[in-house]
Amino acid sequence: MGKTFAEKALGRAAGREVSANEVVTVEPDFCMSHDNTGPISRTFKKIGVTSAWKPERLVVILDHGVPAPSSDHAVNHKEAREFMAAQGALNFYDVTSAGGVCHQKFCEEGFALPGLVVIGSDSHTCTYGAFGTFATGIGRTEMAAAWATGQIWLKVPESIKINVTGRFNRGVTAKDFILKVMGDVKSDGADYMSVEFHGDGIEGMSIAGRMTLCNLGIEMGAKNAVCRPDGKILDFIKGREKSRNWEALWADADAEYAREINYDLGEIEPGVAKPHTVDNYAAIGEVAGTKVSQAFLGTCTNGRLEDLRAAAEILSGKRITVRMIVIPASWEVYRAAMRDGTIDTLLDAGCIVCNSGCGPCLGAHMGTLAPGETCISTANRNFKGRMGNKDSFIFLASPYTVAASALAGEISDPREVL
Amino acid sequence: MGEVLKGRAWVFGDDVDTDLIYHNKYLAETDPKKMPQYSFEYYPGKEKFAKGVKPGDFVVAGKNFGCGSSREHAVYCLKEAGVPVILAETCSRIYYRNAINNAYPVLFVKGLSEAIKCGRIKDGDSLSVELDTGEINDVTSGAHFHGDAVSDLERDIMDAGGLIPYLKAEKGRR
Amino acid sequence: MGKTMIMKIMERASGKEVKIGDRVWCEIDLSTARDFGGANCTLQFDEITDKKGRVWDPAKIAFTFDLQAPSHSEKVSANQKIIREFAKRQGIEKVFDINWGIGQHVLLENGLVKPGDVILGTDSHMNLLGGVAAFATGVGNTDIAASWLNGTNWFRVPETMRIEVTGEFSCGVYMRDLLTLLVGDLGAGGMDFLAVEFVGETIDRSSLAERITLCSMVTEMSGKIGLILPNGPVLDWLAERTGADGDLVRQRVRDIAPDDDAPYCEVHRYDISKLEPMASCPDAPDNVKTVRSIAGEAVDQVHIGSCTNGRFSDISAAFEVLRKGGFKVSPKVRTIITPATREVMAQCAREGFIEKFLDAGVVFTNPTCSLCTAEHYGALPSGDVGCSTTNRNFIGKVGKGSHTYLMSPASAMATAVRGVVTDPRDILC
């Protein structure tokens, strides 16, 4: 019997052969945290240690409230800054143009590598699966313990295999596909599991698109989500590798899965997740015409160059009719979008282009919603109150759909403007 | 006529800016009744003002009280706390307008800045203040001050109960 | 006896002859509110008119969103929404939402400000519009709500101070440095209740951005308004922006020019040829020293922007320092640049500045008031020291227990490059 990706990656880290449902203790290759580093460091100090087991394996990227939107945030940042300085500040990304949304930055910097085991004190850590990394989100206390001991216990997850064939039609993206998958699998359908994306449909997809897929693994309850690290990935990581321990792993053809699902990308159409759950899927036709008050393009889910370009494609030479906030996922993305004129196009269309960071995704700043307002967003969660007020509404959609909706002031099918 | 107000003094220095009176952190508040809790939170040594102030207490300050922002919160937070009048050597023009527009009296008191600096008027002193005449007595220290009353137009607005009632009474038209 | 500029403006707006000290009712040309105090204005207006009242003239009201753009809290979002809905209900079309930038600058760029106009706003730095000889003043919500009832408000006719400036700025020295010198000389209450006319060859030659800088800080000396009569390229720009009102703009300039025998309560003369880079030290704008004398002081964050110094030429001055400094800011400081408006930001993008700033390590934000108001981008933790081109460094203004130096964009960028307070001439000249 063959092995799944999770069995191979965790087995490699544990130094022995493992199977689903076993519990293993492994040493993480990297530990990622963000603005919550301050509170974690307090717990860490309570354990009674001063230095992390391997300070070079800590990666801290400030992104949730940058630049600090309040003095409380500022105090929090300072705590992270001081803690990292005490650890040698080897992988610390402060409020500078070296930063960005932690997950985007983590991947750009070459920490997300095939076969590594990465833990992060953020649920969307699963994004790194796009690079063939076994990456999973954990809580603050557990992170403090991992820093102190260099160990974490993990149950080897069962796996779901999603076979993807075909190509997207024009105006349809990885976001539309994964929203559909979430609608089918439901928000708890992959609880504790590893989600593997297989097939030529994935091979034809950009790295950015794969990151969008894996990023939303957690929204189905998954422990991690992963794509095969193919040539595109190996080319990308070349020269960026922050660890020599990587190895391109993939599931065996005869591995055992709890469930298999098949999709043809050619059948996918633009879609949304309606308020207030991520699995409340609707095809665009069902919701077109819904008035929106704000559009938001950005986040670890859809703030990459191709996402910004998609919006610019729709908005070029036109004027938006509702406020639209654009936040590139990292400064590398920002720079590239600046160089190719994408930012210019978005500004001319009336968008507000903010500095890289999480922005309003979690309601902390840069576009918090008021009661009764509706936002169409490329982010990953539409929970009640996620972007501020509990009486506001969030629709999740692709960059194309968000831009088309900002143009019309109501949810619109991007295929009609493209 | 001739009503004499009695209360304790809370004493501040010169150039007390609007962030010290009511910090920008709380600007989103729109209900004046909720503003007193933030009064002087950022003023070093007066962090307890909001909890300790009693209706009838006086705010006593030196020159240029209320400089800085246009926020009317800085008037509301003291008026709603029951401070009956601001005693200051001078106060900034926006603050002054905001006070008059809310029928909230400010007395301009000559020599107050110096008196504060040399301790002739201190925190906790008992004061008696006659609004009509501008006579101010520090019962604790025995010091005496005189405050200037406002000009005619401001007096009319004050008497009407503020700018809005004044305009509603159609006194505002030329 | 002749008339000063503010007297002529008030005579035009009140329709009668005025004397210093008079209280006059003036017609309001533009009554604005922003997401700072704006909801207080609309709620108050609704309250006093039982929600049935109509504003006196929807075309003369504008809303701008800059305090928290985009909003950083539920409460601010709710306030912004209250404003949007009020505007809709009242037929007010001039709503410059979160994607525009700092209010006064947006009003200027959109041709809504003419010399001699009387303009109200919930912003104590409204008076930077005095840079084009408008009488613009910051007021509280009651004043705004009242003006919406009948389009008038009361003012005292102020005495006028005259400041004559001659000479040319030497390398590394800017209008901001003159301003800082003035604040130090005259003090926080130095212009209390006064109008100020800035005149002289230096002023005549100055750009719009420089005039804005100068007039914005009149507030920090408790002045009512600083006025500069538009001329040359500034007048041409203003006439172009106001479109159909272009001729009116030129006529107004002639109408409000002060008389030769106008009465001035004080006259100050400055020759700026020998002026040095200046800084306002913690914790008061009038605690002024030369940048040279505080060189080497450690800072944690540098911020360039605000209504005082957020225009393209300000960012351009900072860019020049960065260029000469090797296109790299010190890793010891966090450097944040915030353009005043989207127009300024687009210009920075076109000129290739933003890319270079990013390469150098700078965080470039969207146009907004940024850390200057209500704890926004770049709030400081206790114990941190900031260096900023904003206009106030009151105790705890950007975070309890923090302290801030105020200086010109060039000095601020020199500080960012070296990581400690630095005289920009050390890099530029």
Image (cartoon, coloured by chain):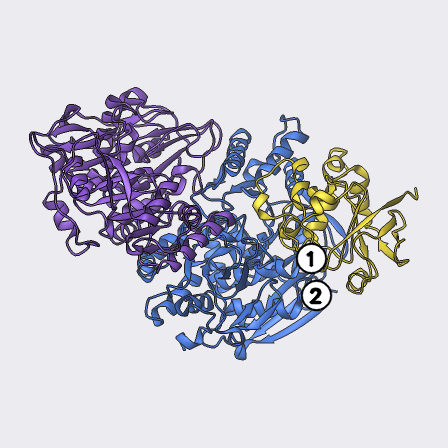
Q: Which chain is purple?
A: A
In front of the other: C318 or C194:
C318
Q: Colour of chain B?
A: yellow
The answer to which of marks 2 and 1 sits earlier in the sequence is 1
Q: Chain of mark 2?
A: C
Q: Position of residue A391 (x, y in %)?
A: 47, 26
- Residue that label 1 marks: C7
Type of amino acid under label 1: Met
Q: Which amino acid does the dot numbered 2 rest on?
A: Ala
Q: Colour of chain C?
A: blue
Q: Secondary structure at mark 1?
A: helix
Image mark for residue C262? 2
Give above or below for B124 relative to A324: below
- The residues tagged by marks 2 and 1 sit, at their Cα atoms, a distance apart of 9 Å
Residue C376 placement (x, y as % from top left): 49, 48
Q: What secondary structure is marked by label 2?
A: loop
Whether residue A394 appears in this view of the structure is yes
Question: Is the residue under label 1 in contact with that under label 2 (CB below 8 Å)?
Answer: yes
Give the number of the disc on residue A229: none
